Structures are given as C-alpha cells and as structure tokens.
Image: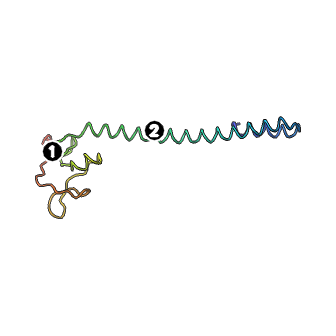
Amino acid sequence: MGLVETSLEVVKLATKIANPELVQAATKANIEALEISGRNLELRKHAEELESKVKQLEAQLVLTGEVFREGDFVYREGESGACCSRCWDVDNRLVHIIWVEFGPGCPQCKIHAFHVVPNPHMK
C-alpha cells in the first residue's frame, strides 16, 4: 500500500472514531502525502529528461571524436564523403555534400562547395 492510500485509510479510521482533531490531522497528512506524491512524479520526470540529455551529450561527444577537419570540409572517420563544415560548426550535424542544383553543395544549409574531395584518410 502506498503513502497516499495509507493516509486515506487513516482518514477513514479517524472518521469512524469520530475524533475531530484526529480527522483534521489525518486530512492534513493526506494533503501533504498528495503533495509529496506529485513532487515525486515531477522529480522522476525531470530525472528521465536529464538521463536523456546525458545520452544525447555522450553520443555527441563520441561523434566529435570521430570527426576531423581537412581544408574547408569535415569528415567522419571511416566515411569517404565530405560533410558541410557550416552545418557541423553551427548545428553539430554531419550533412554530406551532395550534387545539388548548381553543383556540389549542402542540402541542408544550401551552401555550395567548389572543391569537394574524398576523405584524404580513407585507403
């Protein structure tokens, strides 16, 4: 039986005994139990949000360790294609340079690349 259920049982028993002071104290305890329960739910939600944020930051840290800059582009270890340095610098996103309307460029930020070269570290 949880805290809220227990405090409700105490209120019921106090009502049966017909002791106004006991009923008042039990009702106050019940209100406090409800407040504590609500705060507990808020804290759990906040803890879950923080855990999610930590996972995102850890993933970003791993990705940052895999990315290097060569000339005007960024590359991810093990991948051959160049990525947009603007998208990486501003949004921490790896967006591959592809062929767009006027030549090679970034499909996300629309910046055009003039000298796209394969990853110089790929064998």
Circle 2 — which element? helix
| Mark found first going from the N terminus, 2 or 1 | 2
Amino acid at pointer 1: Asn
Coloring basis for residues: rainbow
**Residue that badge 2 annotates:** 51
Q: Residue 89, which numbered label?
A: none
Q: Is residue 109 above or below residue 67?
A: below
**Residue that badge 1 annotates:** 119
Query: Residue 15, position in %: x, y?
Result: 85, 40
Amino acid at pointer 2: Glu
Q: Identify the residue shown where x is 32% and y is 40%.
A: 60
Q: Nearer the viewer, mark 2 or mark 1?
A: 2
Query: Residue 43, position in %: x, y?
Result: 55, 38
Outermost residue, bottom side = 101
Using residue 89 as the reference point, say whether residue 7 is left or right of it. Answer: right
Q: Is residue 112 above or below residue 53?
A: below
Query: Quadrant location of the N terminus?
Result: top right
The one nearer the camera, 36 or 120, is 36
Query: Residue 27, position in %: x, y?
Result: 77, 40
Outermost residue, left side = 115
The crowd level at tag 1 (other Cα within 10 Å; few <14, some 14-19, many 20+) is many
Q: Identify the residue shown where x is 15% and y is 54%.
A: 113
The one nearer the camera, 43 or 75, is 43
